[in-house]
Amino acid sequence: MSERPRILTGDTPTGRLHLGHWVGSVKRRVQLQQTHDCYFIIANYHAFTTRPENSGEIRSDCLEIARDHLAMGIDPDLSTIFLQSEIPAIHELCFLFAMLLPFNRVMRNPTLKDEIKVKDLGETYSFGFPLYAVGQCSDILTFRPVGVPVGADQVPHLEMTREVARRFNQMYCNVDVHAEDDDHVKLGGVFPVPRADVGAVGRLMGIDGKNKMSKSLGNAIFISDSAKEVEKKVMKIFTGRQSPTEPGDVNNALFQFVEAFIQDAARVAELKDRYSRGDNLGDGHVKKEVAEAINTLLEPMRKRRAQFEGRDDLVMDILRTGCTKANATAEATLEAARKAANLHFFPRSVGYRSK
Ligand code: ATP
Ligand code: MG
């Protein structure tokens, strides 16, 4: 298992997982677990950066996200699902990494700026909010992965993570500033310089037809939605088109759903052709087909999810096993990083008591 190349990715428990997660990242995760050593983080401290007053909800969202993972086909025998707050090494490395990034570099991160805007954080966000961007570098590098399967919005974070890995290796491991990214570990660096692996649909729009589908924006179709809820939500996808004979824009949100979820390529081509010509093809008709396709995808996921509904004990067991394995990997990284940064004083281990 450990011979396999490693990947890490994850989600913030700010709600349940949605179709954007599936197309942007989780579909790829399900494939990669056959060939890679996979770590999936539930980034619960990061949820505190925007809603620290809702700690109870954050806790229950952790379990919901784990259920969503299992529903979508993440196999806990193949992959490690774990909680960020249970891995002390992540937070220790975060402190070191925060010194390697200029403050203004963090604040210029376009994903951070975008979040401040769309989540309406204005001038009121906490000191801790931008820290999550550094924390994310640490979530990733603590596991020393070669790749990170993510949606397109995460690419700027990955770029920062790559900078941190290079700087650490140059500052503390004597890796030459001109070294190729792929050579850093060979040249003695503690951290590989990981690549972003963006899914087939890097940015699925929400049903508002305006913003990225997002747990926090009320525009998401959730993996756990019932067939009826899916139909209702798909019917709401906003296109602004007035009549079935009006030539439609096949780059709109509705057609992004057509391309992402209708499996039959010939049917997709036909729908696009008729829609763009205004050949008496109403939005309602297209939406019905989209809803059917989404429900076909979600049906087996609903069945798998049902096995874990009301079974927090099963989910907690899976998380405990995942956290134990994640800590072993994370402590090995921390030890290497501490040695490199002259912070190695006493060997230690992290473990759980039975009670
Ligand atoms: P939040 O609104 O709290 O930021 P989110 O819906 O953006 O939540 P995250 O937990 O931030 O979800 O993202 C988890 C992963 O899913 C990331 O890799 C992200 O890029 C990907 N992802 C999230 N939304 C989409 C989307 N609409 N399309 C494609 N990928 C997405
Ligand atoms: Mg997000």
Image: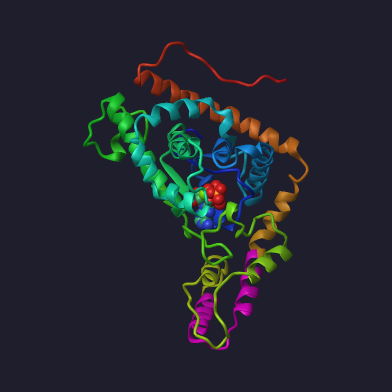
Q: Is residue 354 visible?
A: yes
The spot of residue 99 in percent (x, y) is 36, 29
Q: 260 or 162, which lies in front?
A: 162
Left or right, 308 with respect to 1, comes to right
What residue is drawn where x is 31% and y is 32%? 167
Rendered image quadrant of residue 40: top right
Report the residue that reaches farthest toward the right.
Answer: 310
Q: Is residue 193 visible?
A: no
The spot of residue 119 in percent (x, y) is 53, 51
Left or right, 339 with respect to 299, comes to left
Report the residue that reaches farthest toward the top.
Answer: 346
What residue is drawn where x is 39% and y is 39%? 161
Total marks in image: 0
Q: How is the image coloured?
A: rainbow
Which quadrant of the rendered structure holds the C terminus? Answer: top right
The spot of residue 200 in percent (x, y) is 47, 59
What residue is drawn where x is 35% and y is 20%? 341
What residue is drawn where x is 75% and y is 35%? 313
Q: 297 or 241, which lies in front?
A: 241
Q: 272 or 156, which lies in front?
A: 156
Q: Is residue 265 above or below residue 169?
A: below
Q: Main secondary structure of the magenta part?
A: helix
Q: Is residue 119 above or below residue 167?
A: below
Left or right, 109 with respect to 241, comes to left
Rendered image quadrant of residue 230: bottom right
Determine if the magenta segment contains residue 238: no
The spot of residue 210 in percent (x, y) is 51, 65
Q: Is residue 199 above or below residue 133?
A: below
Rendered image quadrant of residue 180: top left
**Which stretch did the figure color magenta?**
266-294
Determine if the magenta segment contains residue 268: yes
Q: Is residue 272 above or below residue 139?
A: below
